[in-house]
Image (tube, rainbow, N blue to C red):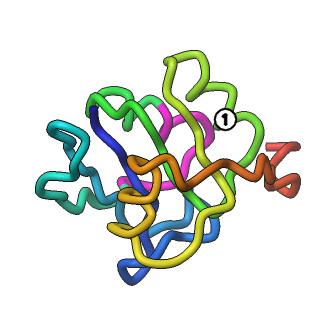
Amino acid sequence: MKIAVASLNENVAEHFGHCECFYVFETHEGKLTDGKAVANPGHKPGFLPNFLNDLGVNVIIAGGMGMAAVEIFNSHDIEVVIGAKGDVKKAAGAYLAGELESTGSICHEHEAH
């Protein structure tokens, strides 16, 4: 499984599209293996969910995101976890441990785009 965490200064970014990079963690036997930072190629409507899908991501963790992005992730069967905060590695680990749940908080200011 691959878990991507939207990151700003190695913390979960408040909005996934405005992050500086995505930390992509591989998992093995229920544990995180090495994570690598993948630069955010730019915030364009509909682009980032497809970009992360092409990387083989199964889960995206962020502070928040717009409904259009959530719908695209869902169409790729990528689980969306929003409402996360803090260190990116701890957030990914908490998800793996079943301790991180999505708040369902959608960023409504992006709905008209």
Residue 74, placed above or below residue 10 = above
Identify the amino acid type marked 1: Val
Which residue is under mark 1?
Answer: 70
- Estimate the x, y position of residue 15 in percent, counting from the top left: 63, 63
- Estimate the x, y position of residue 92 in percent, counting from the top left: 39, 57
Q: Residue at x 86, y 57 (%)?
A: 109
Helix, strand or loop at label 1? It is helix
Depth check: give the residue in front, 76 or 86. 86
- Estimate the x, y position of residue 41 in percent, counting from the top left: 36, 53
Q: For the view shown, which residue lies furthest in the bottom direction?
A: 9
Residue 98, placed above or below residue 49 = below
Q: Residue at x 51, y 18 (%)?
A: 77
Q: Residues within 10 Å of mark 1 (few under 14, many from 20)?
A: many
Q: Residue at x 25, y 56 (%)?
A: 38
Quarter where residue 51 is shown = top left
Q: Is residue 47 magenta?
A: yes
Depth check: give the residue in front, 89 or 37. 89
Report whether 46 appears left or right of 10.
right
Magenta stretch: helix, strand or loop mostly: loop
Q: Quadrant of the C terminus?
A: top right
Residue 76, placed above or below residue 41 = above
Q: Is residue 25 magenta?
A: no
- State which region is magenta: 41-49
Q: Residue at x 80, y 55 (%)?
A: 107
- Estimate the x, y position of residue 7 in percent, counting from the top left: 42, 69
Count up the numbered dots.
1
Q: Quadrant of the N terminus?
A: top left
